[in-house]
Image (spheres, grey):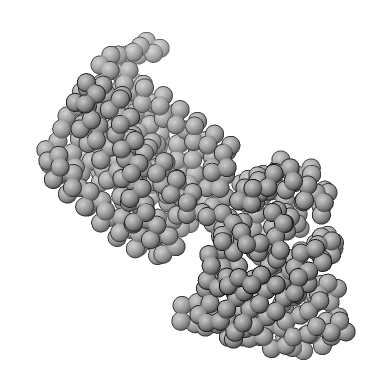
Amino acid sequence: MLSVKNIDVAYGRAKVLHDISLELEPGRMVFIAGRNGAGKTTFLKSIAGFMKPLAGTITFLNKNITGLPPEKVALLGIRYVFQDKRVFSNLTVRENLELAAYPVKEKISTAVEKVMSIYPKMEKFLNLRAGSLSGGQRQILLIGRALVGDPKLLLIDEPTEGLAAGTINDILNVLSMMKGKVSMIIVEQNLSVVGMLGDKVYIMREGKIVQECSDKTDITDKAKLEKFL
Amino acid sequence: MINTIAYGLTIGAILYIISIGLSLTFGTMRIVNFAHGFVYTIGAYLLISSLPFVRNNFFLGALIAVVAVIPISYVVERFVIRKLYGVSIDYAIIATYAVALIGVDLTKWIWGASPIPLSDPIGMDISIFSVTLPMYRVLIIALSLVIFGALTVFFKKTIIGKIVIASLEDKDAVKSLGINVDKYFSIVFIIGSCLAALGGVLYAPITSVHPYMGMMVLLISFAVVLVGGLGNIKGTFVSAFVLGMVMAITGRFWGPAAETMVFVVMGIVLIFKPVEV
């Protein structure tokens, strides 16, 4: 479904990703782990079209998407969920969903239903400003917003960062519900989350993939994963 | 004093009409658009040129001038502004300032450098609460209120408005939904330019029309935008009327300081509320 082959990415003259390759099959949930500054977010941004690779290719459903602008990548069915819970805080929850529904020509009622199906509690917040939601609710809104238009691949950046344990459970429930229905690449530092949900884990260090684990025993072995970080 | 207040409200209304486009361009695209002053000037000159063709009907001439600005602003946006999205703010200043200077010379070449006076298009007074005011000025104030209301509805109720509001906050997140933000920025830019031209048209009968009129008003408009907040529709409205009043009241007691006082107020506001660019 997604094939990233030998990409190099740089900020100006500083190269931050070196020869990165990744393969993703449909319906799989792949995690990318690594310490701060390892290049995880840059990698997701490169797939989403926010960073243009210097070298290498990114192919999605047999179409070369290397260097396509983010709005075109999104319309092909790849949605990027930013870190830092970046909702449109001046718009209501419903308007956030309306904006997601507009480019894919989906009915707002269908978009709302999609979010309700993964988090029914969101109904009472629909007419509130998204900026008034808690961190966990914002994250769920972002994931729900990304599901509008039935994307084929979600790129989710640090979904549990800065959240309390109870809220992390809500996010885990949402991600579990989506598992198998949509492919996902998730950047996550919380190795317990990785162990619970991951089909495959890539460990990144200094802009390179240093380890790839697809064996469930390795993925659930937090101590072993930590050694690679 | 009543006349001073009426003058302040008129200046405020015109400042609002000019500044709102500047504020939205600044807020969404992070572009300091000096070419805005050129569009303001060209609006006034297009009015003058169109008047003989519409039997000196000011309002029809005004409409023609504002509509004629659409292709001009599209060319500026397409070939100058669009190249500046995402680049350093100083490039935008240099490029749009160049457009403004070319605009001034072009204006001088076509219409000449001498100021052209225009008379009050209505030429009637109106009595409100036993105060007599020129009807034209009351009309300008009323029009600014209508524009404020229309823009508020536009940004709250239409999908284009919501996209712009979301882009003011997080342009990349809007792109990640599959929305071509630049297309909507172009729409905002053209709406803003039409409003600038309308400002020029409306101010023409109050002052005289000359090639540098846009350069003069532009700096005051920047002050309005900075005090009101980048892309803040309500803030720009309040700021325009407050600074318009500051100009009018200062001008009544000490004429030469009228414009300076606007920048003093801006400085004070920026000390307490710095602008994030």
Say left or right for A117 vs A22.
right
Residue A80 in sight in this render: yes
Give the camera-side residue of B244 and A188. A188
State the image quarter where residue B120 is shown: top left
Q: Percent position (x, y) of residue B28? A: 47, 52
State the image quarter where residue B196 is shown: top left
The residue under the point 57% across, 78% down is A57
- Classify A193 as above or below B171: below
Q: Residue furthest right?
A: A217
Q: Count the numbered circles shown.
A: 0
The residue under the point 66% across, 62% down is A77
Q: Percent position (x, y) of residue A132? A: 70, 48
Q: Percent position (x, y) of residue B137? A: 33, 23
Give the camera-side residue of B49 and A223. B49
- Classify B39 as above or below A177: above
Which quadrant: the C terminus of chain A?
bottom right
The residue under the point 30% across, 25% down is B60
Which quadrant: the N terminus of chain A?
bottom right
Say left or right for A148 vs A5.
right
Give the camera-side residue of B5 and B127. B127
The residue under the point 25% across, 56% down is B98
Give the camera-side residue of A76 and B33. A76
State the image quarter where residue A63 is shown: bottom right
Say left or right for A22 vs A190.
left
Q: Percent position (x, y) of residue A175? A: 80, 64
Residue B6 in sight in this render: no
